Image (tube, rainbow, N blue to C red):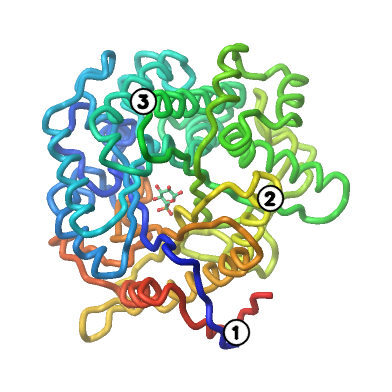
Amino acid sequence: MVKQIAFPDKFWWGAASSGPQSEGDFNKAHQNVMDYWYQESPTEFFNQVGPKLASDFFEKYRDDLRLMKQIGFNSFRTSIQWSRLIKDLETGEPDLNAIDYYNGLIDAAKKNGIELVLNLHHFDLPVELLQKYGGWESKKVVELFVKYAQTALELFGDKVNYWTTFNEPMVIPEAGYLYGFHYPKYVGKGKEAMQVIYNINLASARVIQLYKQMKLKGQIGIILNLTPAYPRSNSLEDLAASEIVDALFNRSFLDPAVKGSFPKNLVELLEKDGVLWQGTKEELAIIQANTVDFLGVNYYHPKRVKAPGKEAKYSAWMPDKYFEEWQMPNCRMNVYRGWEIYPKAVYDIAMNVKKNYGNIPWFISENGMGVEGEERFIDEDGRIQDDYRINFYKEHLAWLAKAIDEGSNCFGYHTWTAFDCWSWNNAYKNRYGLIAVDLENQKRTIKKSGYWYKKVSDHNGFTYDLDYEIK
Ligand code: BG6
């Protein structure tokens, strides 16, 4: 099937990264939870590679932004590190070195004509706030986050047009409190996870409120990982399970961010089970009044959901009593990551946002394919021939273009990621970049997908020539 795929004028082409995953952890005032986790348990990280140097973006950002320009970027997201910017976590007083660094980064992006999106939190809570206050379970931490955000916005708010409060906030309760794959690695703390969801929503709304009070000229949004929950069958039990998964894993952040309220079915369920978060009327009014200007959607894979089996796996309350995930037989998989590849979900997300969320302006803020052992694909010129990645992007973009043709208000597409970066305990196992990073010497080499991306950005579209049908 050969077809021209076109995108609207001024469409964003670029990628996302984050401070902790790209910069290296030197010169920082504090450790974040990931730095600390590595310090305590390096063997839990792939090949024991930690955040010490990462991709050395702290030193190389000027060159890296030039390279991004070279592969066609007009926009780029990264994050400010709370643990870098703030010297005194209680007062929000900034660190002078960090101010220089962020000013340099903002200038370098401008110089290259790249619209910078600055995010305020990418899983990287300063570990002292976990140890002292209990992290995101505590409203004290919400207060301190607002202080940090105020410092960031006072320093850089008028120089950067696009801000986001959190990246994938659902990962914090999911990975840290429910299933234990990120620090603090709790398993089975369902009730605490619900409080974390509430507190982070409150923190996000408080920062949006502050941004509006400061009358800054840009826009503020949030980045959510939306994983459509497809039921195994149309049985009432499977449908009920998928509705609960959608309410908990997608709508618990999407609804407050865009509509200012929590999903009714989720609140009722948590109330019935006696695990509803502690909140006040005043806080709910803040959430109600301070919704986002735009939405970023990270999409990697769908969730396949069915009614739960009979066996209780956890002693304390866990949402899993209402659902089970399952893998569809014969589905397409990214075997390196263990994630299903299902590009049509991009279209489903777009239509959901159009129909149920007022067609708010949004963009794909992360989408990508991590592959292990990419050295296998290096050609005689030293370039990685990552056609699998190009095909992955083509399919997702084709579904996105179809959604835009049907009225979706999508204004951009960011890949994960620009150059290979460190990914928490997966470290450098799976490479996602359009630009390869050699960990021996930090040398950057544009992959085949990087050259392809440049053409897509130049033409604001591409020729779709794959067998998979988009209809
Ligand atoms: C996204 C995160 O969910 O997935 C990134 O925002 C992360 O921080 C990316 O690096 C890929 O994750 P992984 O574990 O496959 O390397």
Q: Which residue is mark 3?
A: 214
Looking at the image, which is closer to me, 356 or 187?
356
The residue type indicated by label 2 comes to Ala
> Which quarter of the image is occupied by the C terminus?
bottom right
Tell me where residue 410 appears, x and y as whole percent. Answer: 53, 57
The residue lying toward the viewer, choosing from 379 and 393, is: 393
Q: Nearer the viewer, mark 2 or mark 3?
A: 3
Residue at position x 35%, y 58% in the image: 429
Rounded to the nearest whole Å, what is the CA distance between mark 2 and mark 1? 26 Å
Q: Mark 3: which amino acid?
A: Met
Q: How many marks?
A: 3
Q: Secondary structure at mark 2?
A: strand
Residue in the image at 26% along x and 19% along y = 92
Residue in the picture at 30% in, 42% down: 160
Q: Which residue is mark 1?
A: 467
Q: Is residue 2 above or below residue 16?
A: below
Q: x and y percent of residue 340 in the render?
A: 58, 62
Say few, some or many: other residues with alpha carbon within 10 Å of mark 2 (under 14 / 14 to 19 / 20 or more): many
- Using the rendered image of the protein, determine whether residue 321 is visible from the camera's viewpoint: yes
Q: Nearer the viewer, mark 1 or mark 3?
A: 3
Callout 3: helix, strand or loop? loop
Helix, strand or loop for disc 1:
loop
